[in-house]
Image (cartoon, rainbow, N blue to C red):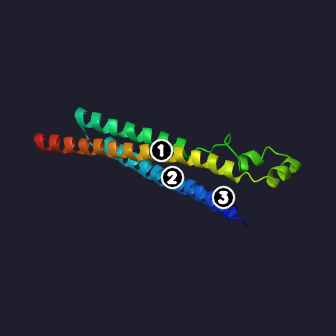
Amino acid sequence: MTHTDIALTAAHAEVKAELARTDTKASLLLAFTGAALAGVWTVASNTPLRPAALAVGGAGALVLLGVVALLLRAVRPNLGGGGGFPKWATLSPEELRTAFAEDGRAEDIANLSRIAVRKFARLQRAIDLTYVAGALILAATVIAMVQAGGAA
């Protein structure tokens, strides 16, 4: 094995691992966001809230829905993309033999790296929006508590 061959194999494995880690992180954040939305819905539907708290909390819930959409976009399969499995599914056995006779790892690494960067960017935006939603929901909680204290 040449140094280039070893480097290509390592880079290919690394970028695939990064994609898997990103999908795992996005899936965990998606589960957290779903739980947060369920909690917000439960509290909002079982607690008498004034319009100010409802408006701020509703904005937080809308931001969380935006997070869900962004995360679903991040983990959506890319069937029209570069090499690998989707491409192999379209080839005949003879075309597969020809494709495997060529070393397409460099192209595959480049394609997978671009996919990974897009996933990372969406994940970063989703996390930032989760912070915003959390701040809005916390503000709604404070408003509700102040209003409840003022009504007593």
Q: Earlier in the sequence, mark 3 or mark 1?
A: 3
User: Is 92 situated left or right of 140 in this image?
Assistant: right
Q: Which residue is mark 1?
A: 121
Point out residue 82 in the picture as x, y percentages from the top left corner: 68, 44
Of circles 3 and 2, which is in front? Answer: 3
The reply to whether dot 2 and dot 1 touch (C-beta < 8 Å) is: no
Q: Earlier in the sequence, mark 3 or mark 2?
A: 3
Residue placed at 47% from the left, 47% from the top?
A: 123
Of circles 2 and 1, which is in front? Answer: 1
Q: Earlier in the sequence, mark 2 or mark 1?
A: 2
Amino acid type at circle 3 is: Leu
Nearer to me, 4 or 75: 4
The reply to whether dot 3 and dot 1 touch (C-beta < 8 Å) is: no
Amino acid type at circle 2 is: Ser
Q: Which residue is mark 2?
A: 27
Q: Which residue is mark 3?
A: 8
Spatial CA distance of label 3 from label 1 is 25 Å
Of circles 3 and 1, which is in front? Answer: 3
Secondary structure of residue under mark 3: helix
Residue placed at 61% from the left, 56% from the top?
A: 16
Looking at the image, the residue that sits furthest to the right is: 94
Q: Residues within 10 Å of mark 3 (few under 14, many from 20)?
A: some
Amino acid type at circle 1 is: Ala
Q: Is residue 41 above or below residue 11?
A: above
Spatial CA distance of label 2 from label 1 is 15 Å
Nearer to me, 77 or 49: 77
Q: Quadrant of the C terminus?
A: top left
Spatial CA distance of label 3 from label 2 is 29 Å
